[in-house]
């Protein structure tokens, strides 16, 4: 079944703990946390102080998505919060293999993120070391953007690659996910979806999550 990771970027930050508790009780699989530094992306979000409050409220594992320039610094900062995954953008990392080893040394599962224009072939010699690949289906930086559907053939290509190189590696898609594109994502071989505005703007969040767990 498709796993669902609601992105708390679309939650009510004035009631963050309440919203995190609610999505966890509503059956989500992971809690997706978007960390933006105002440099790699034109937006600034939350640091370890706020994410530790999220970790305290969450009864599901955290999926931390770094959108930052200095990945190593941020990995060290967030590792003590014991997330399940930390993902970093390959476009911003000179030594992906070294960083993967560092993340793993903390007992955290490493994932690499690809922007919409980055080709999956970039991962040929590193896929074997990953627990997950995150494909962006919007330009990183903001919630509520429209789904870029070239992610579908890309996920299919990556699905073939991981079958050959690392069948255990999951494929996650992030951005503009809703009940409108979930079947196409499933058909393309995707295992995990991030959904921000679709879940948090829905009148029944449990129903929204369920509609994606196909
Ligand atoms: C965008 C973030 C996403 C975003 C998704 O940079 O990585 O996780 O919050 O939000 P929606 O589902 O609204 O596109
Ligand atoms: Zn994200």
Image: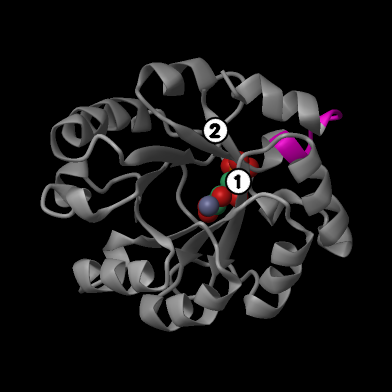
Q: Which residue is painted at 21% across and 42% down in the image?
A: 120
- Residue 150, compared with residue 114, is above or below; it is above
Label 1 neighbourhood size at 10 Å, few (<14), some (14-19), many (20+)? many
User: In which quadrant will I find the C terminus?
Assistant: top right
- Residue 65, compared with residue 183, is above or below; it is below
Label 2 neighbourhood size at 10 Å, few (<14), some (14-19), many (20+)? many
- Residue 20, compared with residue 163, is above or below; it is below
Under circle 2, the secondary element is strand
Q: First in sequence, mark 2 or 1: give its number.
A: 2
Q: Determine whether, in the image, residue 41 is placed left or right of residue 92.
A: right
The answer to whether residue 181 of the structure is visible from this angle is no
Highlighted range, magenta: 199-204
Residue sitting nearer the eye, 100 or 43: 100
Q: What is the magenta segment's predominant secondary structure?
A: loop
Q: Which residue is painted at 73% across and 27% down in the image?
A: 208
At which x and y percent is residue 182? 53, 21
Q: Determine whether, in the image, residue 211 is placed left or right of residue 105.
A: right
Q: Which residue is painted at 82% across and 50% down in the image?
A: 21
At which x and y percent is residue 55? 69, 64
Q: Determine whether, in the image, residue 150 is placed left or right of residue 32.
A: left
- Marks 2/1 in contact by CB < 8 Å: the verdict is yes
Label at residue 30 = 1
Under circle 1, the secondary element is loop
The answer to whether residue 119 of the structure is visible from this angle is yes
Residue sitting nearer the eye, 142 or 72: 72
Q: Which residue is mark 2?
A: 3
């Amino acid at each position: 079944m498709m796993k669902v990771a609601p992105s708390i970027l679309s939650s009510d930050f004035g009631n963050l703990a309440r919203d995190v508790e609610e999505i966890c009780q509503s059956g989500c699989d992971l809690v997706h946390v978007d960390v933006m530094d105002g440099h790699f992306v034109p937006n600034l979000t939350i640091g370890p102080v706020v994410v530790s409050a999220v970790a305290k409220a969450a009864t599901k594992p955290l999926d931390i998505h770094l959108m930052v320039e200095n990945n190593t610094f941020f990995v060290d900062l967030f590792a003590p919060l014991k997330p399940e995954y930390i993902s970093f953008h390959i476009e911003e990392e000179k030594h992906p293999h070294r960083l993967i080893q560092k993340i793993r040394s903390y007992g955290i599962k490493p994932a690499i993120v690809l922007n919409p224009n980055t080709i999956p072939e970039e991962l040929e010699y590193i896929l074997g070391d990953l627990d997950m690949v995150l494909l962006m289906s919007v330009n990183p930086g903001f919630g509520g953007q429209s789904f870029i559907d070239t992610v579908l053939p890309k996920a299919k290509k990556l699905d073939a690659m991981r079958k050959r190189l690392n069948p255990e590696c999951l494929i996650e898609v992030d951005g503009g996910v809703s009940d409108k594109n979930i079947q196409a994502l499933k058909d393309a071989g995707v295992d995990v979806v991030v959904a921000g505005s679709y879940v948090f703007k829905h009148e029944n969040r449990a129903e929204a999550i369920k509609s994606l767990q196909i």
